[in-house]
Image (spheres, rainbow, N blue to C red):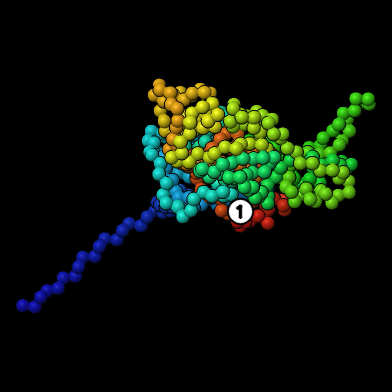
């Protein structure tokens, strides 16, 4: 008998997704994709303070590469996607510390080098902030001055690395006294891109201000010049004005202790005369004494995972027993802002642990002036898609 062929039963058609379901799936996919890209490859940042001016400006929007130094695995996995410390527009924490994982770094294609512009988690807790987990601490951006094992010194504002002068970044700023016979106003300084900033999270930054001299005989004050925080190129322009009678680079004096300087409990250092000191390297061993505790005591206590550490200005105890030497468990870095007199950096809070490194700043993709001279100057067009050096 001939075979009887039967027609296969057709599969039932899938019900069509509703409009709301399609939107939900699209948004979910976008959030997952953005979270993975942000964690694994590239993350956007915005410059909030002038500590890197004029290399990086307040209002610059950056892309920071995670691939250069290797992506960190998250320590705090329970977190609202695409947030950092708080849920957008609220003071509600965006994370839970119920689960804390050990952190690892995936292989990168380079290491942090001297001169790199690096984003990292601010090591010590900021005043008034909770003690966030490492991967949720406030993001800072500075230039790497010293890598593990380097000997660092700042001598009369010149940075020395292993005894050799480090090139000054072209956009680096410092403070000058400009003696003038003319009264200058904000409009003049804005033309030279010298703007006072009173909105910085690190506090007010005054880039120019008049200096007056008091006359005892007449009981009056007279303008003698201006304190100007700017670049060497702008100072060269000042030298061309016939009403400028003198320019002096303002420096802290050697041996003059600055309040709040890191290591100041044992050394008379300041912003312009700092060190020499050695940047800790994994496996490096130091003796324990007053001088080394001033520089490395906080590392032993906070960043190395040691428990039951008792720290005094002259002794270190671990598990109740005094130690005479210590061997570091990870690498550290020394960071400084290019705006050398207006930067909260390693000179004030110490070294950056390797597990706090976030990534390398590679590109400015947008730049917005918060206080433009006019609406049309709000976007800094000359900074768009600028490679960071």
Q: Is residue 377 left or right of residue 319?
A: right
Task: Confirm whether residue 234 shows in the render.
Answer: yes
**Which residue is located at x 60 percent, y 37 percent?**
276
Q: What percent of the width, then of the height, locates residue 64?
A: 53, 50
Q: In this view, does 149 lie to the left or right of 61?
A: left
- Front one among 250 and 284: 284
- Front one among 239 and 20: 239
Vertical placement of residue 266 versus 19, above or below: above
Q: What percent of the width, then of the height, locates residue 154?
A: 64, 40
User: Which residue is under mark 1?
Assistant: 389
Q: How many marks are shown on the rendered structure?
A: 1
**Which residue is located at x 86 percent, y 31 percent?**
213
- Front one among 34 and 249: 249
Q: In which quarter of the image is the N terminus?
A: bottom left
**Which residue is located at x 32 percent, y 57 percent?**
15
Q: In which quarter of the image is residue 182?
A: top right
Vertical placement of residue 77 versus 232, above or below: above
SS type, badge 1: loop
Vertical placement of residue 12 versus 136, above or below: below
- Residue furthest to the left in view is 1
- Front one among 300 and 20: 300
């Amino acid at each position: 008998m001939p075979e009887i062929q039967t027609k296969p039963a057709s599969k039932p058609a899938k019900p069509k997704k509703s409009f709301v379901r399609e939107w939900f799936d699209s948004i979910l996919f976008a959030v997952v994709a953005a979270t993975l890209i942000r964690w694994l490859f590239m993350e956007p940042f915005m410059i909030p303070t002038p500590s890197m001016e004029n290399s990086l400006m307040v209002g610059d929007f950056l892309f920071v590469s995670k691939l250069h130094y290797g992506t960190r695995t998250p320590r705090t996995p329970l977190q609202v996607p695409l947030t950092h410390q708080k849920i957008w527009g609220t003071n509600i924490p965006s994370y839970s510390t119920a689960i804390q994982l050990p952190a690892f770094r995936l292989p990168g294609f380079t290491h942090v080098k001297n001169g790199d512009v690096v984003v990292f988690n601010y090591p010590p807790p900021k005043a008034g902030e909770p003690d966030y987990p490492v991967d949720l601490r406030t993001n800072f951006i500075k230039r790497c001055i010293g890598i593990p094992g380097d000997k660092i010194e700042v001598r009369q504002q010149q940075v020395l690395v292993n005894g050799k002068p480090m090139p000054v970044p072209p956009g680096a700023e410092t403070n000058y006294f400009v003696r003038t016979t003319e009264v200058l106003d904000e409009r003049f300084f804005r033309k030279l891109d010298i703007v006072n900033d009173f909105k910085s999270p690190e506090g007010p930054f005054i880039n120019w201000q008049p200096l007056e001299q008091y006359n005892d005989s007449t009981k009056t004050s007279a303008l003698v010049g201006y304190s100007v925080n700017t670049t060497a190129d702008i100072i060269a322009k000042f030298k061309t004005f016939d009403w400028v009678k003198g320019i002096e680079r303002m420096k802290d004096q050697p041996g003059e202790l600055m309040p709040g300087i890191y290591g100041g409990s044992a050394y008379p250092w300041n912003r312009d005369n700092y060190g020499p000191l050695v940047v800790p390297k994994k496996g490096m061993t130091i003796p324990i004494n007053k001088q080394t505790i001033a520089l490395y005591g906080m590392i032993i206590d906070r960043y190395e995972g040691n428990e039951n550490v008792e720290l005094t200005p002259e002794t270190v105890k671990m598990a109740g027993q005094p130690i005479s030497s210590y061997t570091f468990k990870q690498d550290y870095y020394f960071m400084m802002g290019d705006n050398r007199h207006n930067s909260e950096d390693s000179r004030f809070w110490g070294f950056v642990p390797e597990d706090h490194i976030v990534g390398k700043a590679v590109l400015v993709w947008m730049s917005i002036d918060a206080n433009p001279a006019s609406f049309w100057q709000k976007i800094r067009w000359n900074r768009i898609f600028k490679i960071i050096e």
